[in-house]
Amino acid sequence: MHKTITNYSELIEIITAEVFSGKTPYLIAISGPPASGKSTLAERLVADLNNAGMESCFCPMDGFHLTNKQLDQQGLHNAKGRIDTFDGIAFAKAIECLADKVSFWWPLYSRQRHDPIPEGTRILGSEKAFVIEGNYVLVPDEPWLSAANTFNLRIFVDVADTILRQRLLGRHKQSGRSEQIALEKIEQVDMPNTQEIRDHRQDVDIIYWVEANV
């Protein structure tokens, strides 16, 4: 049975206690629809954990996007953002490396290049906690399931659809898309993905529901 939380103070109190008393590294997974506030929440958690003396690192799933070249080769460019446009196998292997305290590069996604950067964040292997964030990190199918079985805490973030659409429009326009193209992507890709993410996920420990910026 999951717990629903709408207050950040309550959430960070729970997580700090878990990281302090749990085994290391402690893996926290944050999933939810696109633009629900997952990355904002994840970065805030990492900052607060680090301020509390618990060395932590933000590990977003977006770095495992297939490259634009790969998408073009597979005819998937227009579906970018859908689950089959990510390298789930590489993601699962990276989660295994986190759990095994391996030193390696965690890839990041560049919204300027619109492509992943392989040498994104350096993982030392000595961190006490990792906050793993992404649309599909709690999908109950392989290879995502193998990764999720490693997580110590599962959080699902969600907001109202009206807020999602507003945030998505701003995000797409900021990355250089026209308003018309942005709206088409929202309705054809983002919102169908949103419903799929909500309907098709593992059981979670916490649902974090907000209707404003976290």
Image: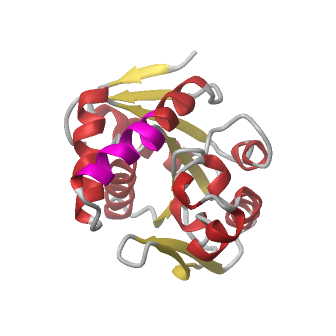
- Give the quarter of the figure containing the C terminus: top left
**With 82 as the anchor, is 11 left or right in this view?**
left
Residue 183 on the magenta segment: yes
User: Residue at 51% across / 41% down in the picture?
Assistant: 31
Nearest the camera: 197 or 165?
165
Find residue 102 and report its horizontal and vertical position in percent: 71, 75
Relative horizontal placement of residue 125, taking residue 163 as reference (left or right): right
Q: Horizontal and vertical percent for residue 88?
A: 71, 56
Toward the bottom, the furthest residue is 119
**Residue visible at 76% across and 63% down in the picture:** 93
Q: Horizontal and vertical percent for residue 156?
A: 48, 33
- Taking depth in this image into account, of 17 and 213 the one nearest to the observer is 213
Q: Quadrant of residue 126?
A: bottom right
- Is residue 42 visible in the rendered image? The answer is yes
Q: Is residue 89 magenta?
A: no
**Can you say whether 99 is above or below 83 in the image?**
below
Where residue 95 sits: x, y (%)? 69, 60
Q: Is residue 58 left or right of residue 139?
A: left
